[in-house]
Image: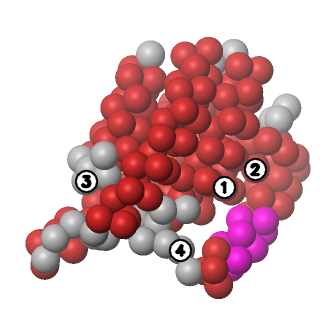
Amino acid sequence: MTTTALGLAYILLEYKASVWMWVVGFIMQSLGIVLYYQKGLYADCGMEFYYLAMTVYGFVAWMRHKQKTQDLPIRHMPPKTAWIWLGIAAVIWLAIYLVLTNFTDSRVPILDAFTTALSIVGIWALARKYLEQWFVWMVVDVVTCGLYFYKDIPFKASLYGIYVVIAVFGYFKWKEMLHTD
């Protein structure tokens, strides 16, 4: 329940492009490590460690830019970068899937690996403040919502259902902010 409340605060701060989302995210991910391990979502658990590192990176990147001039601007991801990161996501998906099927008792290795791989790309794109990060989160959120209902984590599943809606609105909000910067 606590991680659900923190998750809602996080996504609302992301919607507003607030640097404070990184602080809330750090606390949320710390608690998520325990939850996902207990539920056997090992890739999600491991991803939380990556998220912790990325929250520090994102916070520093956003604050460093703010200290120099103004907020880090929202921008488009260059197409070449998008293709590279899609390729990286595919490789990560396969690698995590192989680890999960060969070294864990995961009953959902394909989806667990998929959402983890896309989330790795999504959080990186968020830290760089790319508009297109919202598309990644829309896919992750839809799949994760179903996965968490299946794994009997209804509060988190419901949160991801809300995330889908906020991600759609977030995309349009950031798109508007992109043109006004």
Amino acid at the residue labelled 2: Phe
Residue type marked 4: Met
Circle 4 is placed at which residue position?
77
Q: Nearer the viewer, mark 2 or mark 3?
A: 3
Quadrant (top left/top right/bottom left/bottom right) for the N terminus: top left
Read off the residue under disc 1: 118
Could you tell whether 15 is left or right of 111 in the image? left
Disc 3 target residue: 19
24 or 172, nearer to the observer: 172
Which secondary structure lies at badge 2?
Answer: helix
Disc 1 and disc 2 in contact, CB within 8 angstroms: yes
Q: Tell me if residue 152 comes above or below residue 80 in the rendering.
A: above
SS at circle 3: loop
Quadrant of the rendered image containing residue 8:
top left
> Any mark on residue 114, and which?
2
Distance, label 1 to label 2, CA atoms, is 6 Å
Foreground: disc 4 or disc 2: 4
Of labels 4 and 1, earlier in sequence is 4
Bounds of the magenta span? 83-91
Of badges 3 and 4, the one in the foreground is 4
Give the CA distance from mark 4 to mark 1. Answer: 15 Å
Precedes in sequence: disc 2 or disc 3? 3
